[in-house]
Amino acid sequence: MHLAQALLNLIVSAAEPAAPAVAATAADAATGAHGTASGGTRELFIQICYLGASVLFIFGLRGLTSPDKSRRGMQLAALGMLVAIIGTLIHHDIVTYTWIIVGLVIGSAIGAAISIWMPMTAVPQRTAISHAFGALAATLVGISHYDQITRVLAEQVTRVDMAALGFEVMFGSLTITGSLMAFGKFHGILPRPPITYKFQNLSNIALFCVAALMFVYLVVTPSDSAAHATIFYLMVLVGLAVGVLIVIPIGGADMPVVISLLNSYAGLAASATGFALGNNVLIIAGALDGASGFFLSILMSKAMNRSFTNVLFGAFGAAPEAGAAQSADGLSVNSISVEDAAVQLGYARFVIVVPGYGMAVAQAQHAVRELSDLIEERGGEVKFAIHPVAGRMPGHMNVLLAEADIAYDKLLDMDEINGEFPRADVALVIGANDVVNPAARNDPASPIHGMPILNADQAQSVIVLKRSMNPGFAGIENALFYDPKCSILFGDAKSSLTKLVAEVKAV
Amino acid sequence: MPVSFDLVLLASDPTVTPLTTPFLQLYVFVLAGFVGFQIITKVPALLHTPLMSATNAISGISLVGSLVAAGADYSTYSTWLGFIAVTAATINVVGGFMITDRMLKMFKRRERK
């Protein structure tokens, strides 16, 4: 710790050769980040660090536009973060490093441990909980800032600052609990089906209005009025409640939208922190995060054929009235044996695999890879058709398949692969259901009509690996399963695939 | 070394009205949002999960605010809040960048035979 302190002192004195490092007084702190003339060099150094960090963040994200450049890009972004942290550590308000170092050490240890030992199927949980952590940090910084101005310095919060602080703690608090709820749903602690009750939307909207009124009150009323602090903390509490209430009525199938939206809120909370502290790097990083989350939630909504408002307020629409949809009465399915399926796959020239989350649940990725290697050894071609909502969060299925050592150039988006289905000898559907339901295209009465799907039904033949005939998330029958060219291999995905691998070897 | 940087002048210039700063911040926010949106629309669906954990790590930049709160000795209360915030944000930053790298490492191109 002494070493770190000495190092920091060195940086401080290097950055500020003219003036000695003077501990800031409370009055000094009140003038904000701009500093006095003597703190000018230091302030300039900090601002250059922040500017550099912002540029590095943008370069980092740009790296993600191609898998080959992505790792290098993220290293740049991580460097940006380091630069921003170093810049901040010489901030003239900081007088003691003890708690900073303790926090950094504990945080690094926890963060590293999670990221090293966490299985890839748990990425959605980790993402949800880290949205909660990010929002927690923003909220606490907001509360500390408010307390510093109103109680410690006993000064007025300007209206502009109060608006920024209000957004910060509002977005922050609802993201904390919302993300924790999402974590619970992903992790199976909370029930996946929506939790609904009477007047749910009405009471949620009412609570939201209460929060909005408190917000307005805080901005228009002078901050030294008696009730100001009480209302401020009450607003945080209401925000926490709103976070819980807006996520519980959302069903498991809609979680990709929710997690993207929470990503966006966490970013907006960070941005609002930047407004409140007058710190541009926070504003920029938060805006990047906010934009990314917003874009992904639009994409996910589209992929599920739902509007934003429908996901958030019509959550119950997730369990649509199936009455109008095709009934399965009087239809029969073709069941296929492992041997027959193996012959079909063994002699296929072109196979498209359609993986659904059922495959990941069964931990069958490696068996899929083995099967695909075998088919390729026999001269066939294998591609994977990835629906945008195939996993539990955007892009999740790609990560799971990449982890099983499947080359990423075989993983194709819906738009890239859909034209290739008619050419495929076999479409192998593993644990996917609604995303290959042709009713989305053909049946205007179906609740999923209009949802973009993978055209597995256009392949020459279809083999579906399925546990039972239970309908999918949306609770609707899938016409594909009753198609004469479709056959179903019943059983657990992993054991079916393992058997298939053995049989194809023998073909 | 004389200290006469524009930045300092800007801050001490009495003709700068209080509204200017928030407005400039708004510009920064809107423009950064546009830049972000433009780049992110070009990220292939293949990398959407790493994208989310990357932006998550980047938004761990709240750490910057947390560090000041934890180290400024404003009040015991603030220090505690700051300490918790530093811990939470660091989990995000370190965990976020590490998990993103772990994921990106797995994406391999087909070996040429």
Image (spheres, grey):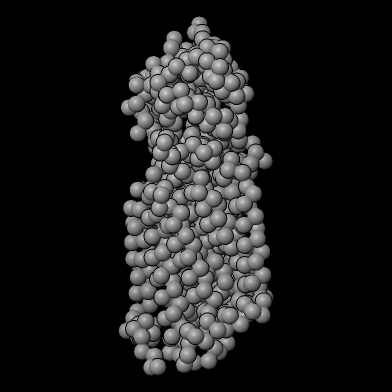
Q: In the image, what residue occupies the spot 63% across and 41% down?
A: A187
Q: Would you say residue A235 is visible in this rendering?
A: no
Give above or below for A483 relative to A107.
above
Q: In the image, what residue occupies the spot 39% across and 44% down?
A: B44
Rendered location of residue A464, percent (x, y):
51, 19
- Please tell me which residue lies in front, A94 or A155: A94
Give above or below for A25 relative to A388.
below
Rendered location of residue A279, percent (x, y):
45, 71
- Please tell me which residue lies in front, B13 or B97: B97
Determine whether, in the image, residue B107 is placed left or right of residue B22: right
Quadrant showing the N terminus of chain A: bottom right
Give above or below for A46 relative to A250.
below
Rendered location of residue A288, percent (x, y):
41, 57
Q: In the image, what residue occupies the spot 46% across and 43% down?
A: B108
Q: In the image, what residue occupies the spot 65% across and 55% down?
A: A113
Question: Picture quarter containing residue A359?
Answer: top right
- Please tell me which residue lies in front, A111 or A303: A111
Q: Would you say residue A186 is visible in this rendering?
A: yes
Q: Residue furthest top?
A: A330
Rendered location of residue A44, percent (x, y):
42, 81
Give above or below for A367 relative to A89.
above
Number of marks: 0
Determine whether, in the image, residue A312 is placed left or right of residue A490: left
